[in-house]
Image (spheres, helix red, strand yellow):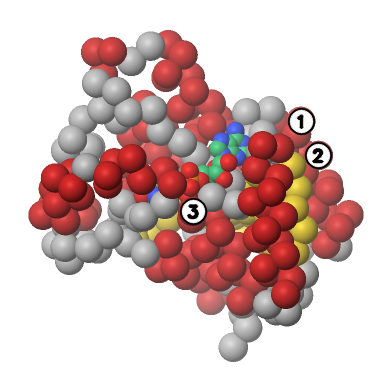
Amino acid sequence: MQDLEGKVAFVTGGSGGLGTAIATALARQGAAVAVADLPSRTSQVAALVGQLQTSGQAEAAGVELDVRAPASIRAAVEDTVARLGGLDIGVCNAGLNVRKPSLEVTEEDWDTVLDVNLRGVFFSAQSVAAKLVEQGRGGKIVLIASIMGLVGSPFGHAAAYCASKAGVVNLARTLAVEWANYRINVNAVAPTYAPTPLTEGLFNDQSRLQAVLDRTPMASLASPESIADAVAFLASPRADMITGVTLPVDCGWTAW
Ligand SMILES: NC(=O)c1ccc[n+]([C@@H]2O[C@H](COP(=O)([O-])OP(=O)(O)OC[C@H]3O[C@@H](n4cnc5c(N)ncnc54)[C@H](O)[C@@H]3O)[C@@H](O)[C@H]2O)c1
């Protein structure tokens, strides 16, 4: 069954590890997908758009933005509508981390993380919602949080990241309440560690990987596809009655 037939989705950080899996899952469900990413990611965006188009399931387009610059997000949303004919789903996925002991974190480190992970997510959601309100037919927004927005990191070195993701979890709640009248559902997905470029450096360290597996009830990382499936569910009509929640895809990490 193709739940998202006729829908248009906009995915920030769309050419990254999880973004690629999310764009692919949405396209597989029939959505046309705008892969939104930094200008420096043009070749990765073009490759993914080509892949989505040749798989023949739906239309796709690459759009440029920097989530640190709200005007560029608004322009990317307009570009999406012009090229794909509307907007129904926004996935606010772009994110990064600066790993450092908290005693060494500089103002610049803090701002780097918060600017993309929290400010960028808010203005991405705002830009999508403004278009959904203008169209008057509701829609779905999915924010990518993290287990680190629900519990602290046992390994430290992630204060700004944890704070930003906790902010995303509460943004999902408060935006869900504020935009319910417009029939806009706002939810979040909180993944555990997944193998992507973001975690590559971390898992070059075999003992760190083992520590993550030992801390996880299912002794597993999450696959990007399993995270993408949760996003596709929350973006679908099957989730019409769900808003303001954060769905962990965490192999049991937050269960204890
Ligand atoms: N991989 C994991 O283990 C994991 C776990 C929990 C949450 N997450 C979250 O999932 C999201 C995606 O992470 P990922 O693992 O795919 O990382 P990634 O590094 O593979 O991809 C991140 C993407 O975001 C884009 N991006 C970064 N800054 C941007 C900006 N200013 N404007 C626009 N795009 C920007 C990058 O170009 C890239 O395409 C992030 O929010 C991350 O915090 C990841």
Above or below residue 129? Residue 248 is below
Above or below residue 129? Residue 157 is above
| Image point (47%, 27%), residue name | 114
Q: Of the residues shown, which amino acid type is indicated by label 1?
A: Ala
Q: Are marks 3 and 1 in contact (CB under 8 Å)?
A: no
Q: Are marks 1 and 2 in contact (CB under 8 Å)?
A: yes
Q: Nearer the viewer, mark 3 or mark 2?
A: 3
Cα–Cα span, label 3 and label 1: 25 Å
The picture places residue 140, in percent across and down from the top left corner, at 62, 60
Q: Pointer 3: what residue? A: 17
| Image point (14%, 52%), residue name | 210
Cα–Cα span, label 3 and label 2: 24 Å
Q: Pointer 2: what residue? A: 75
| Total residue callouts | 3
Q: Looking at the image, is mark 3 or mark 1 earlier in the sequence?
A: 3
The picture places residue 64, in percent across and down from the top left corner, at 74, 42
Residue 68: quarter of image? top right
Residue 165: quarter of image? top left
**Quick one: 32 or 247, which is closer to the camera?**
32
Number of the label disc, if any, that sits on residue 71: 1
